Amino acid sequence: MNSLAEPRWWEKFLWPVAASALFLAVWHYSVIYSATKVFPSPLAVERGLAELARKGLLWAYIGDSLRRVALGYGMAAVIGVPLGLTLGWYPAANQVVNPVLQMLRPISPIAWIPVSIVLFGVGDLTAVFLIFLAAFFPIVVACVSGVPNVPTIFRRAGRNLGLTAPQLLARVVFPAALPQIIVGLRLALGIAWLVMVAAEMIAVDSGLGYLVIDARNSGKRYDLVVAAMLTIGVIGLALDLCFRRLRNIRSVRWGFPQ
């Protein structure tokens, strides 16, 4: 039997559902067996989600979190993709800028929280700035790495057609490097979503990250804490699935292994 065989269509749905059901069952009976008074059961979390939905907080907090990620991540993509392509196209410029990038890249965005609060105060700007930092460097690195992988024949063909350097970057290099860029964008989105939670715990008074810390501090509502955590995970999964769907677009599908 070939272990790499493509799963049948029904298996793509059956096994994830079965794994989710098993997880919920283990969670439920673990709470019963341990008789814990702290960690909530799945039913308690469900009631907590229903309570948040009735009060209108759930959708408002989800909207605030998505808005901050869209702003920070969007700015990182708009700035990072052209910058990365340019640095990859001009190795001399990359040699000048790369030491600074490599020095700043390993610094966790969480370490920037005190600085960002001093610069922007406590509010949305701080959270958006931290999300921007989280996404910016992976995007730039992916773009810089993608340019040298573009076949030389593509560049020569573009030059023979009279394309200028900016036109080559936009019409030849960018489409050819797009598969690797998409991988970088996907990785950056996952990091941005993680940092969003930490930023909202400290810098703002709304969003899913704020809900986690607020539910813990206000009456130790661990059912709401876990409800917020699961919501964060489900939305993160949905965002990742959206990027994975990009592989099916004809213009980029050729770049991924089949």
Image (cartoon, rainbow, N blue to C red):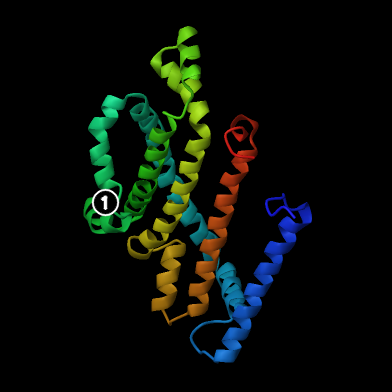
Give 63 or 12, whichever is nearer the viewer.
12
Q: Is residue 51 left or right of residue 221?
A: right
Q: Pinpoint residue 89: horizontal percent, then vertical percent.
A: 37, 24
Secondary structure under tag 1 reads helix
Quadrant containing the C terminus in the rendered view: top right
Q: Residues within 10 Å of mark 1 (few under 14, many from 20)?
A: some
Residue for point 42% across, 52% down: 192
Residue for point 56% across, 45% down: 243
Q: Pinpoint residue 90: horizontal percent, then vertical percent.
A: 32, 24
Q: Pinpoint residue 123: horizontal percent, then vertical percent.
A: 33, 56
Residue designated by label 1: 120
Judge whether 30 appears above or below 46 on screen: below
Q: Which amino acid does label 1 sit on?
A: Phe
Give 5 or 136, whichever is nearer the viewer.
5
Q: Pinpoint residue 16: horizontal percent, then vertical percent.
A: 68, 62
Q: Please give the count of numbered marks on the rendered protein.
A: 1
